[in-house]
Structures are given as structure tokens and as C-alpha cells.
Image: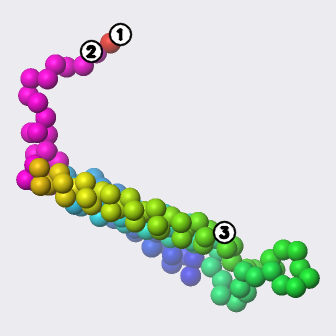
Amino acid sequence: MEVLLSVLVGAFFAAAIYLILSKHSVRMLLGIAILGNAVNLLIFTGGRLTREVPPIIGKGLDALPPGTANPLPQALILTAIVISFSFFAFLLVLTYRAYQELGTDNTDEMRLAEPKDDPMPPLGY
């Protein structure tokens, strides 16, 4: 099962990088969302996947029994889901406002909004 999820993580990363390298901001936004899911799945897979033994410390024990899933990555993923959703919502609003102001989601056409006769920055100091 972990090998299958590792392949899925690789496919998510490949799709995310492909979408992020696009010229359209909506595709970039979807790539960032997929990248967040890929990272969450990577952390989840790294925390070991087992169903047999729940991550509960029994009576009289000081540590988890061997073979249990690590509960810390699962807790970190819950936090990461909330943060990535808020980041996605912010980027969605930013992309929508840029589309409203510029009338396009193509990043090459967005460069037309920059001033034409802006002086070049200094090449050296």
C-alpha cells in the first residue's frame, strides 16, 4: 500500500509542477492546490500506514506498541489542510481580482500592465 501511495505522490508532484509552469494563472492556482495535497499525502505516507493497531497507549504501557501508525503526522496534516485551504482561498481571490483588473489570466499579457518607460535598475554598485 505504501508503494502505491508513493507512486501517487510522485504523480501528484509531477502534475503540480507541470501546472505551476503554465502561463495561465488559473492553472498555476490548481497546481499549487495539487502540490499542497501531494505534500500532505507524502507526510501521511511517511507516518506509516497500518490499520491493525490503533495509536493508543494501553494501560500500564509507557509507549506505543510496535507496528502502530505514528499519530503526529496525522495531526500535522490536519493543520496543513486548514493552512493550505486558506492559502488557496487567498490566491483564488488574488487571481480573480487580477483577472478583473487586467482582463486576462495569461501572465505574458499581464506584463503589459507594467510601465513602458521605467528606468532599468542599476547593474552594479
Tell me the residue that label 1 is attached to: 125
Residue at 51% x, 78% y is: 4
Q: Main secondary structure of the magenta part?
A: loop
Q: Secondary structure at mark 3?
A: helix
Tell me the residue that label 3 is attached to: 72
Task: Mark 2 or mark 3: name the one nearer the start of the chain.
Answer: 3
Q: Real-space Cα distance between discs 3 and 1?
A: 49 Å
Query: Could one spot residue 27 in this view of the protein?
Result: yes
Q: Which mark is residue 77?
A: none
Which x, y percent locates residue 23?
19, 52
Give the quadrant of the N terminus: bottom right
Give the residues drawn in magenta, as a range: 102-123
Is 19 on the left or on the right of 12, as rendered?
A: left
Q: Is residue 121 magenta?
A: yes
Residue at 29% x, 64% y is: 30
Tell me the residue that label 2 is attached to: 122
